[in-house]
Image (cartoon, rainbow, N blue to C red):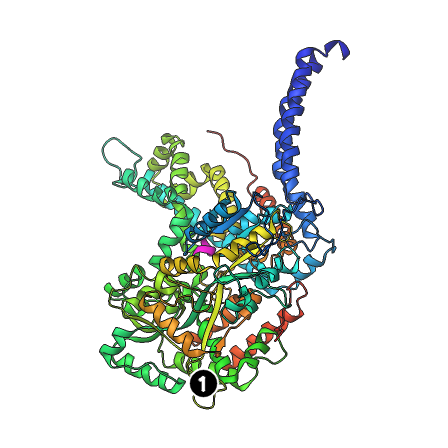
Amino acid sequence: MGSEFNRRDAIKRAMAIGVVAIPSASLLSACATSSGGDKNKPVATGTKSAANPLGVKKGAPLEAFVFKGGFGDDYIKSAETVYNTTYGVTVKHTGTQAIGPKLQPRFANNTPPDFMDNSGADNLDTAALAKEGKLLDLTPLLDAATIDDPSKKVRDVLVAGTVEQGQFGSDKMYALNYAFTVYGSWYSNKLFQEKGWTYPKTFDEMIALGAKTKAAGVALFTYPGKYPYYVHFDLLAQIGKVGGKEVLNAIDDLEDGAFQVDAVKQVLGYYEELAAKKYFLAGSEGKTHIQMQTDWTKGKAALVADGSWVENEAAPTMPKDFDLAVGPLIGGGDSDKLPFGTLYAAAGEPFIVAANGKNPSGGMELLRIMLAKKQTDNFTNTIKSLTCVANSAEGLTLTPGLASANTALKAAGTNVLNARIQDWYVKLNQETIGNLTAQLLTGQINAAKWIEGAQKASDATKKDSSVPKFKHTV
Amino acid sequence: MRHGKYRFIIGFLAIPLALYGVLVISPFVQDFQISMTDWTGLTPDKHYIGFDNYRKIIHNHLFWQSLWHNVLLLLIVPVVTLALGLFFAFMLNVGGRRKGSASVAGVRGSGAYKIIFFFPQVLSVAVIAILWQQIYNPDPDEGVLNVVLHSIGLGSQTQSWLGDPKLALACIMAVMVWANVGFYVVLFSAGMSSIPTEIYEASLLDGATRSTTFFRVTLPLLSDTVATGWVYMGIIAMDAFAYVQLMSVNNGGPNEKTDVVPLLLFKTAFRDNSQYGLAAAMGVAMLLVTLVFAVLTLRLSRRERIEF
């Protein structure tokens, strides 16, 4: 054998080993199961001062990873420009639609970017990240002075509910939800005026309006069966209006029998009646949200349960003179715990900062810049959405839908509801209860069955140890 | 020198084998490893919890329901697709009337049909799914299918296609058949053209009808091609992820009546609290089912070759 071992064989074998070894080594080191503990990386900190309350180090690199969806990412680039000039550095910016798939391996390897807009259909599970301790507690940001008025803290200028929206079962705020969404029943003021309809205040008025619209050849309501949880924007909040915040909180907290209360029975009974009277646009059960919005802008249905993003999203099909408006929650009437005018509104578009990134204070500073008047004006003007900064729309010329949402929000005062089940227990709300809602609206099940199914699903979620649990702290 | 020859062969086989090991085998091993943990995919740390994830799967009725949908797809889609593919290919190649000197010919315009049948193959799954979602649009004025039914006087048959729990899975199956049948028409056409015309001529002289020709001549001589097609269609049916994800209402709905295991796996890993461990266990279960399918297929299709 030895005599046959020649140079060519040696080269061949070496090459074979090399070709095999190199990719396998790199693949194995890149693959998900390769584990390493927390890598001790230098965390950039600078000296704190009045102008630099978070102690950002000048010249320290900052990496931003931004969801580029309906809002685009220009508004963040605009804030980054300010950061660049202040701290003498260029923020490394990535705009993408696939936040989750791109960032999951980076979190798994403990090399996350500093600043992220964790939004879109492919987002990372913020609740799971918070539970795993991967997110920075943003309390220092809340206690820092604002850029516009050093005498005010960031905490003091945020719309009520913004801080809570970023909490996951404790006092720590892990996500700053930058956009402020007003939910409700959206309609065309023009259509309502032409037909002489008025926006209903109670379930009974709604059903009476249904008879009127049907006579006019217009469906009362339409919803996207492909995403039936859109209906919950109204349904859950109506439960809160009828029974008060405690009822809604009990549902969020997965309390025993949370769904078996009168408020739920009243609201679900109303939806059962709507379904029985066939006041929904035919075929709604198979539609996407875009198809739903198109039918509605064409005047086939009077109302849709939607968020304030609908103005931007439905713009391609919305007639110029549509005169978009949002109505507050309807309810049972005077017996309701909360008055007419109560709204369901919540901060959205969660921005997060990595706990073990290289420049956490820089990440928070970029958020502080975004909360300045110059940046919020830019956001509201270009994206047509409110921000989480209170009264930031003041003095701006608003589009009809946005103006209507702004007015409704002001009129609601403190009567603003927010069902956390929608972001704490996504599967429970969107899939399990969503399926029940879809069946209720097609008349396959009645209200009693819906309540029974929702309670069962809520109990099952409560028992499932793999689902992180959250509770209202207030 | 013989030793040198083996060394040469091993030297060259080593590369593909090693690549196969790293790119195909090792992910399976890792999948099994992850399935024993409670990993969330978000941190480097994970804890071994033994067979807990498998226990969870066994008690999850949704998993069994999804698996049943996969089995239904596996039983129905390949049979319908291959049967239609065979029928069309036969008509295009052998089924026509004899004219002139040609004793074996397809129906008139078979060349054009072949191209038309192949059309869906050019489109990506995403395009097909979105296209059909519009066709199935339940709107009585806009949904293509419902409008067509209306205009031919079958207004009573209009449906909320993808929104009806009884119809949704069948509707998705129909799209999968539509998308794949053209490929098999072309594949079987190629197979049929390699069957010597003398055999057809002889059977014609003996007075065989079209159906006799098909079942006694064409099908037996095409069995190898059909077996290959069966395996391919089986794999497509076991997946069905993209069709269901894009077309179904509420991601596998209505009421989870169209959910399939790959979609459930995807939801478990990426949406449902990031449970990578549980999703990995589903992956292992899927691997087992696919292996059973492959073994059964190979067993059943093993038969003597007919030489010609």
Is residue B75 left or right of B185 when viewed as pictured? right
Residue A49, relative to residue A40: is it above or below? below
In-front residue for pair A168/A185: A168
Give percent across and percent down for residue B13. 63, 25
The residue type indicated by label 1 comes to Pro
Residue A341, relative to residue A64: is it above or below? below
Please check the rendered image and state whether residue B244 is part of the magenta-colored stretch, yes or no: yes
**Picture residue at 32% right of the left edge, 40% below the top:** B114
**Picture residue at 65% right of the left edge, 26% below the top:** B14
**Picture residue at 39% right of the left edge, 35% below the top:** B192
Give percent across and percent down for residue B137. 34, 62
Magenta stretch: dominant secondary structure: helix
Is residue B69 left or right of A111 when viewed as pictured? left
Is residue A437 left or right of B7 when viewed as pictured? left
Q: Which residue is mark 1?
A: A339
In-front residue for pair A8/B104: A8
Outermost residue, right side: A2
Dot 1 crowding, Cα within 10 Å, few <14, some 14–19, many 20+: some
Residues shaded magenta = B243-247
Q: Quadrant of residue B68?
A: bottom right
Outermost residue, bottom side: A335
Give percent across and percent down for residue A133. 66, 57
Give percent across and percent down for residue A333. 43, 88
